[in-house]
Image: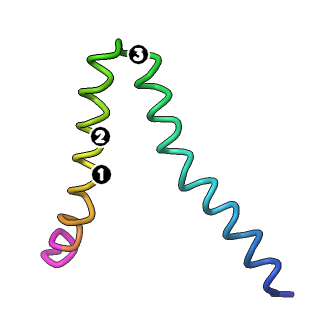
Amino acid sequence: MHSIHTLIIARFFMGLGGSAGVVISRAIVHDLFEEKEAARFYSMMMIIGGIGPIVSPSGEACC
């Protein structure tokens, strides 16, 4: 039986799954790199995260 409660619970778990990648990747960078290297890597992650949604629609359009 579908209800609003099922939708809310499903969206909660979708949010957990979606945020896990960000949290885990930041934890890995924190464990592997020193402060200056980690800052450079974080900035690279932010650039890629910002460019991805811009480039993605053009990639879908050509295929």
Q: Can residue 15 be found in the magenta stretch?
A: no
Quadrant of the image occupied by residue 16: bottom right
Q: Residue at x 17, y 64 (%)?
A: 55
Farthest residue, direction right: 1
- The circle drawn on residue 49 is 1
The amino acid type found where label 1 is placed reads: Gly
Q: Name the residue carrying label 3.
A: 32
Label 1's element? helix
Residue 53, position as x, y percentages in the image: 27, 64
Q: Quadrant of the C terminus?
A: bottom left
Q: Is residue 24 left or right of residue 33?
A: right
Q: Earlier in the sequence, mark 3 or mark 2?
A: 3
- The circle drawn on residue 45 is 2
Q: Residue at x 52, y 39 (%)?
A: 23
Q: Quadrant of the N terminus?
A: bottom right
Q: Nearer the viewer, residue 63 or 47?
A: 47
Range shown magenta? 58-63
The amino acid type found where label 3 is placed reads: Leu
Residue 25, position as x, y percentages in the image: 45, 35
Contact between marks 1 and 2 (CB within 8 A): the answer is: yes
* Crowd class of label 1 (few under 14; some 14 to 19; many from 20; radius 10 Å): few
Q: Residue at x 79, y 85 (%)?
A: 4
Label 3's element? helix
Label 2's element? helix
